[in-house]
Image (cartoon, helix red, strand yellow):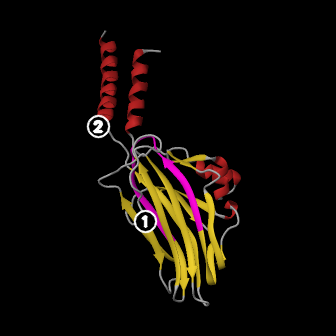
Amino acid sequence: MKIGNILSIVALLGLGVAMPNVVMADTCQNVGVTNGFTLQSLMTAGTCTIDGLAFTFNSGSFDVDSLTGGGSAPATASQVTYTVDNGPVANPLNVPIYGFEFNPDLSVTGVGSADLLIHYTVSASSDVLSSLHVALTGTVLQDNVNASVVEDDIPCLGPGQTNCGAPLNPDLQVSKGSSGTTLYDDIAFAPGGPYQSFAVTKDINVTSINTLGFANISDVRDAFDKVVPEPASVSFVALGLLGLVGAVRRYRKQA
């Protein structure tokens, strides 16, 4: 291969590295298309990716922690459905986000409660996870009724679940009289972040001590956004290589 062609290829590769908006393979979406958009499908797959972030589920990712009275919860992980957040999704920080919208199929009628736990980890190739996005869509009728999501997110720097910090605890609660209300909690990781990985535990709960009470939760978001490294040196190297290609070609014409 001629030297000019080699330099052209290297320069183009350099420019590709410098481009921040290249879309990565979305295998979490493929899992749903192939096996159904359920938590069980994610657990069976083990690990899937959304725009370069790896989400890992296992046999312990689904846990009905408690169920009393008029509470109703899914019997299996196959009854918890999901959609994928991949890029432009409405959120208060107005940034691209990557993760999931789960429908936990949780409700309570009369006196009772239902509590569901979802566990998983998310990891990146470097410290790029820059903020956490949690949302809850639910309905609460009558006094002394509550629909809530409490989440523990343990952040870690570097590869693996090592060098980890204290859990972040976003807490969302739908109040009386709301119907289809969506609440948001968006946490920017400053000054401690960005991070490379998180261990996530979502505690999703509906509770009523009112015989006429009702509550349900139809959507729970868990997503992250990421900083995209744009090292100036990479761009300069790429531009320099392109200049070198031109110089080689001019030299050959003059020779």
Residue in the picture at 34% in, 41% down = 230
Q: Dot 2 lies on which element?
A: helix
Q: Give the image location of residue 160, x and y in percent.
A: 47, 42
- Three-letter code for the amino acid on which mark 1 is drawn: Pro
227 horizontally vs 52: left or right: left
User: In the displayed structure, would residue 206 be above or below residue 196?
Assistant: below
Report the front residue among 173 and 37.
Answer: 173
Instruction: Specify whether residue 197 is in view.
Output: yes
Q: What stretch is highlighted in magenta?
A: 116-136
Q: Give the image location of residue 222, x and y in percent.
A: 50, 60
Q: Confirm whether the magenta stretch covers residue 225.
A: no
Q: Dot 1 lies on which element?
A: loop
User: In the displayed structure, would residue 208 be above or below residue 123?
Assistant: below
Task: Name which of mark 2 and mark 1 comes first in the sequence.
Answer: 1
As drawn, the label of residue 170 is 1
Q: Label 1 crowding class (10 Å Cα cut-off): few <14, some 14-19, many 20+?
A: some
Instruction: Specify whether residue 180 is in view.
Output: no
- Three-letter code for the amino acid on which mark 2 is drawn: Ala
Residue in the picture at 31% in, 22% down = 244
As drawn, the label of residue 232 is 2
Q: Give the image location of residue 253, x and y in percent.
A: 33, 14
Q: Which of marks 2 and 1 is in front?
A: 1
183 horizontally vs 68: left or right: left
User: In the displayed structure, would residue 191 be above or below residue 106?
Assistant: above
Q: Give the image location of residue 20, x and y in percent.
A: 39, 44
Report the front residue among 249 and 62.
Answer: 62
Which quarter of the figure has residue 213?
bottom right
Magenta residues: mostly which secondary structure?
A: strand
